[in-house]
Amino acid sequence: PQLKKIDPDLILRIHINKDANIQEQDWERCGLSLLSVDQNKTFVLFSSDSELTDFKTKLGSYRKGPKGDHKNAPYSGIFASIDNIGPIQPNDRIGRLFNQEGISKVEQITKDKRYVVDIQLWDFGTKDLNLGKMAQVKDFNETNKGKVTDSFVNEGLVLMRVICLGNLVQNLLSLVNSIAVIDMPPQPALTICQQLQTDIRDFPAVSSPHKTAPAVAVLDSGLTSAHPLLSPAVGEAVVVSASGGDPADHHGHGTMVAGLALYGDVGQCIQTRVFRPELKLYSAKVLN
């Protein structure tokens, strides 16, 4: 989700039991805003000082159990789903790509190994405040022999790329509260060489999705409806932009997005040599 304007001291890490079904609006009713959730049902949330105090008061009332003639403890709906609750931990700041490489704990980062990492800070509400926090983290890096090679600061997004040894990455994860996540830089799933060596004839014919399959609509720059990997799934392509014209994609963007919407991990489909659409595809051209 998009980063929100927060005070890092008001962040909670809540793990719920595997059978619970807690939605974002459920947290909002408790005065908490969702920052992230992982596959293990660990939620990272934040709140204002007063709302967080109120949430903890209600949690305390629940833990004391029912009172008088009541059969259930107060506020049992959501609190019964919580396994544990506490402040955000250093391991929570380790990003998805690190996790894919088997690094999910601070101690798994090799201290004397050279890393290139992307650091994302929390959004503190204004560009000036974000610049100030960025400067602090830069100073911390440079003082500890890290090299900041690039940075971007705006309202809503604060990023920097750093080259440093693993011991500094460990310190950043453990000591700097203004950091939201540290991760490895993204890498392309396919090289240009691989793409040039891949021919449409390498793949079996694409079958049509089942007649009861759900549909996905892509609102973009149109669609190349005759694309052999897409055409069996295409239901309709229309134009809804004021400029009119035809529904074809003359820029390639809408077709690319349609492929991602239809297949998800296109790189995996290429590796397995299987493109099997499970959705019906519709296109509305809204961009000229």
Image (cartoon, grey):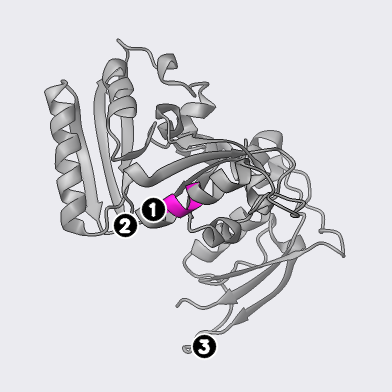
Q: Is mark 1 on a helix, strand or loop?
A: loop
Q: Residue 244 carries which label?
A: 3
> Callout 1, which amino acid?
Leu
> Callout 3, which amino acid?
Gly
Give coordinates of residue 161: x percent, y percent.
27, 36
Crowdedness of circle 3 by 10 Å Cα count: few (<14), some, many (20+)?
few
Mark 1 and mark 3 lie on one chain; the one further toward the N terminus is 1
In this rendering, is residue 198 above or below 141?
below
Left-right relation of 150 to 217: left
Say which residue label 2 marks: 156
Left-right relation of 58 to 173: right
Tell me, yes or no, if residue 230 can be seen here. yes
Query: What range of the chain is rendered magenta?
Result: 52-56
Which residue occupies 51% across, 71% down?
221
The chief SS type of the magenta part is helix
Q: Residue 81 carries which label?
A: none
> Callout 2, which amino acid?
Gly
Which residue occupies 16% across, 38% down?
136
Mark 1 and mark 2 lie on one chain; the one further toward the N terminus is 1
Name the front one of labels 2 and 3.
2
Which residue occupies 52% across, 88% down?
244
Name the image quarter holding residue 109: top left
Mark 2 and mark 3 lie on one chain; the one further toward the N terminus is 2
